[in-house]
Amino acid sequence: MYILSGLTTAFRTLTAFPSPGNESPVPGKSLKWFPIVGAVLGALTILLYGVLDAVAVLPGAGAQAFVLLVFLTLATRGLHIDGLADWADAFWGGYTRERCLDIMKDSNIGTFGAVAVGLLLLGKWIGLGACLSNGQPQIIVLATVMSRLVQVDLASCHSYARSGSGTGRNFIDSATLKTLLFPVVTAFVIVALFTGLQTTIWAFITAFIVGRLFGAWCKYRLKGVTGDVLGAGSELTEMILLLVLAGV
């Protein structure tokens, strides 16, 4: 069905999971499904945690959190982590807009990118461990849903930074402010069901502060956003939510 083609595109874009059906001819139509894909990733992560906790073969929350981090990384093919690395190399290695965009196109990872990835993974591991230690694995779903919603927000509120083609162009160019409506409602309902109203409100406040500040910074440096920026924003939001809301 055409209405579900966006869901197929969303799964094939954001995960390594096989997805039946045909992709949407308008990639931007898949953006509304991003929070649902995030919910599936988060739910599978919690399911994996339940199995690990039941078999009790790992020594504590730290080891369990490491396995969950590996799963999340492999399930997303490290796509957004790669975007974060490219963004970090560009923003700290480039002094002009043109140079930043050139660096982001380079497939090699430099020093700044490697450091950023290392710090991100450390932060996510600590956050995941805190969620498990505090008996709040549901925060994982909150983080995976809201981080994908931030991608939709960045794509909907900013123009594409490059003059030519790019991986993210088809998503960003076809997104408008109206694109945000369905994902916002969907994300709110999903997160509220998993974590309750109060935590959901804090999640939205935190995610949109992070996303809007990050988007404003990228607009200032690049005059827009790219696919790498969407990925970087998603990863940073996910890490911050895991760290900030684990004790809420």
Image: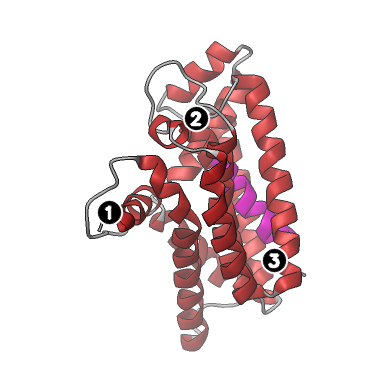
Q: Nearer the viewer, residue 107 or 198?
A: 198
Q: Which region is colored magenta?
A: 232-244
Instruction: From the top left corner, tell me how far across and down residue 171 is, in percent.
Output: 42, 37
Q: CA distance from mark 3 to mark 2?
A: 28 Å
Asked if residue 180 is positioned above or below residue 194 in the image, the reply reads above
Q: Residue 204, percent across and down?
A: 70, 57
Residue at left offset 42%, top offset 27%? 108
User: Tag 2: residue type?
Assistant: Thr
Q: Residues within 10 Å of mark 3 (few under 14, many from 20)?
A: many
Residue 111 coordinates in the image, percent (x, y): 56, 29
Question: Is residue 54 one of those drawn in magenta?
Answer: no
Say left or right for 209 vs 151: right
Give the x, y percent position of residue 200. Answer: 69, 66
Decide: few, some or many residues near mark 2? Use Cα within 10 Å; few <14, some 14-19, many ≥20.
many
Query: What residue lies at 53% left-to-right and 55% top-to-bottom?
Result: 183
> Taking 122 as reference, is 164 left or right?
left
Label 3 residue SS: helix
In terms of image quadrants, where is residue 116?
top right
Q: Gap between marks 1 and 2, in whole Å?
A: 27 Å
- Can you identify the residue that label 3 sits on? 200
Alpha carbons under labels 3 and 1: distance apart: 31 Å
Which residue was labeled with disc 2?
226
- The residue labelled by disc 1 is 2
Check disc 1 and give the amino acid type. Tyr
Mark sitting on residue 104: none
Viewer-nearest residue: 30 or 167: 30
